[in-house]
């Protein structure tokens, strides 16, 4: 079996193509099919690695070190589809590959054109996903952008060609559109009609429509849409606004028989649906009692998607701990402006039960993050540091406990006399490994008993990295001698992968990014442990402040 499903969008961006595609993937997996997910991004950047978080949200990292669009995070949270560099295609990658072939003479001097050379490269990458695993049943291809955008045309043309080549029983088009609500609460179908017309002008007749709407559409409206778009009535579905969670979308689609219609159109025998994990997850959602407030102290707070996976992982952990996690977004520069962080974090504006400092790059806002870490350590408030958040934790310990007031990372202060965080080649007795970033899955060995071992319940773990700077080995003895626990190492013991505060309710910093592996049906163990600690401390009222080292 080797089927293709193309998911496109119309009318406007940000309708939720990624969630729709991921939900379809979850439903088909529930039917026993092996699904692969693929994102086609029209931007000319080679990948998302150098893009501003404010421009495109977070960078999602795969096991093989690819820096990809955040939609791959949705694929990972909703499905079991393995993800790698091959699952993210950009216009930049396509043109780069074709130009390199032309320079090598692969085209034997022929004129290189969008059709067939660019579209052939796109098609080859789409079909290669299924060939990576002979057990693949269905490949779901999300085409980024909006139909009508000039950037998306080569991808839509490649989709059209593949639909023709595969045939209508092996390749289908699902189009996501908007049903806006105008004054008087009237729903308008005209934008959807025009969007489908634009698809038809590209040579693609959508087989199914998913209409984003404020509410469920009645049969009269659905019949009108079917009539004017040449789509069968039983293939017009609604993705209506929900007040619960995006993870209810697979169940919403299931209740409308989206998966059954897809199976019928692709000629796949009907199979019993096994969606118990999703229904259990929703049972947990409705069983939530109580709220905990977690302060996210970062530098990209104006765009929710900048820390998308972190926020989702906190939500997943809340589901398993039976609490609602209220995200308190704190721009670290605000803490820098405060004379006393306790005025903001403790009894003042924010009043948080836990602190999480996520990853990031650059000097801006670092002083505020260090202030937040110091406040959490001294006031015995659960703290979780991820990547930069761990480095901040180490700098704060050096300053607050060891008394090295100028301790810093060489990323922020190259001339510091105590570079407790630095590039590998800046460290003593370490072979020059270059300045390249550590990307992708890396193995870590958990050291002894502690919060990390309690959470994972195993000695060897594998998590994804995205950073250049490391805990400086020259200060390892002094750090541990003053009480800081090194909780995990690289297998050769050369790199510190995690640290913990001693005699603290829960103070953990990790150099890797555990948020990339969390799912709504199975929270990541570190996030689960963090929220459990926050919940316990809130219920118990904490244990008071500690004295300085």
Image: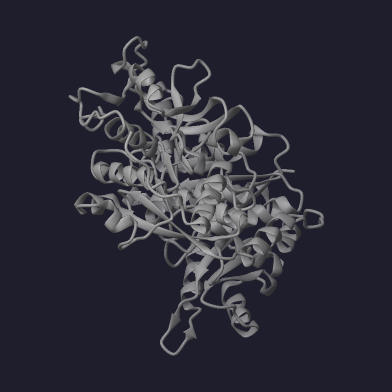
Front in this rendered view, residue 36 or 549: 549
* Residue 167 point in image, percent of width and height: 68, 51
User: Left or right: where does residue 416 sit relative to residue 320?
Assistant: left
Front in this rendered view, residue 21 or 341: 341
Quadrant of the image containing the C terminus: top left
Look at 57% across and 53% down and name the residue there.
Answer: 316
Q: Give above or below for 34 relative to 64.
A: below
* Residue 286 point in image, percent of width and height: 63, 67
* Residue 211 point in image, percent of width and height: 55, 70
Q: Residue furthest bottom?
A: 184
Number of callouts: 0
* Residue 295 point in image, percent of width and height: 39, 54
Look at 29% across and 35% down and name the residue there.
Answer: 400
Task: Judge whether residue 189 can be spotted in this image.
Answer: yes
Look at 56% across and 25% down and name the residue there.
Answer: 448
Q: Give above or below for 23 relative to 477.
A: below
- The part of the image, by quadrant, that contains residue 210 is bottom right
Front in this rendered view, residue 28 or 149: 28
User: Left or right: where does residue 360 sit relative to residue 284?
Assistant: left
Task: Judge whether residue 275 can be spotted in this image.
Answer: no
- The part of the image, by quadrant, that contains residue 546 is top left
Q: Give above or below for 187 relative to 230.
A: below
Quadrant of the image containing the N terminus: top right
Q: How is the image coloured?
A: one colour
């Amino acid at each position: 079996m080797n089927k293709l499903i193309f998911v496109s969008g119309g009318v406007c961006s940000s309708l939720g193509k990624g969630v729709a595609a991921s939900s379809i993937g979850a439903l088909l997996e529930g039917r026993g099919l092996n699904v692969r997910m693929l994102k086609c991004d029209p931007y000319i950047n080679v990948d998302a690695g150098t893009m501003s978080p404010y421009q495109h949200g977070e960078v999602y990292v795969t096991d093989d070190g690819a820096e990809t669009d955040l939609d791959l995070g949705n694929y990972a949270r909703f499905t079991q589809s393995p993800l790698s560099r091959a699952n993210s295609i950009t216009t930049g990658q396509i043109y780069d590959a074709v130009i390199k072939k032309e320079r090598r003479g692969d085209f034997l001097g022929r004129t290189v054109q969008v059709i067939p050379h660019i579209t052939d490269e796109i098609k080859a990458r789409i079909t290669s996903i299924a060939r990576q695993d002979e057990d693949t049943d269905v490949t779901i291809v999300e085409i980024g952008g909006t139909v009508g955008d000039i950037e998306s045309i080569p991808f839509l043309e490649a989709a059209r060609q593949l639909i023709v080549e595969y045939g209508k029983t092996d390749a289908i088009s699902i189009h996501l559109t908007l049903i806006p609500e105008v004054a008087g609460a009237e729903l308008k179908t005209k934008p959807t009609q025009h969007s489908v017309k634009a698809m038809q002008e590209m040579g693609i007749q959508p087989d199914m429509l998913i209409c984003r709407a404020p509410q469920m559409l009645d049969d009269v409206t659905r019949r009108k849409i079917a009539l004017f778009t040449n789509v069968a009535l039983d293939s017009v579905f609604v993705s209506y606004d929900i007040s619960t969670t995006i993870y209810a979308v697979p169940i919403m689609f299931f209740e409308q028989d989206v998966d059954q219609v897809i199976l019928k159109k692709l000629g796949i025998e009907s199979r019993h649906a096994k969606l118990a994990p999703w229904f259990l997850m929703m049972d947990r959602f409705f069983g939530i009692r109580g709220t905990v407030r977690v302060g996210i102290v970062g530098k990209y707070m104006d765009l929710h998607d900048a820390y998308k996976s972190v926020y989702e992982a906190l939500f997943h952990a809340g589901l398993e701990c039976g609490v609602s996690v209220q995200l308190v977004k704190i721009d670290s520069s605000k803490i820098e402006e405060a004379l006393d962080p306790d005025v903001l974090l403790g009894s003042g504006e924010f009043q948080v039960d836990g602190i999480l400092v996520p990853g990031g790059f650059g000097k801006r806002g670092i002083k505020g993050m260090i202030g937040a870490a110091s406040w959490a350590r001294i006031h015995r408030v659960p703290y979780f540091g991820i990547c930069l958040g761990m480095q901040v934790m180490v700098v704060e310990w050096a300053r607050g406990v060891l008394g090295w007031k100028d301790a810093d990372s060489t990323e922020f202060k190259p001339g510091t006399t105590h570079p407790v965080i630095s590039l590998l080649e800046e460290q003593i007795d370490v072979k020059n490994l270059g300045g390249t970033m550590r990307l992708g899955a890396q193995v870590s060995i958990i050291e002894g008993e502690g919060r990390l071992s309690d959470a994972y319940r195993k000695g060897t773990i594998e998590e994804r990295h995205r950073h250049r700077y490391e805990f400086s080995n020259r200060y390892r003895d002094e750090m541990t001698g003053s009480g800081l626990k090194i909780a995990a190492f690289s297998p050769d013991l050369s790199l510190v992968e995690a640290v913990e505060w001693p005699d603290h309710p829960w103070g953990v910093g990790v150099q890797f990014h555990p948020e990339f592996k969390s799912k709504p049906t199975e929270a990541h163990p570190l996030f689960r442990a963090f929220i459990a600690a926050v919940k316990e401390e809130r219920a118990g009222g904490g244990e008071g402040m500690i004295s300085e080292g």
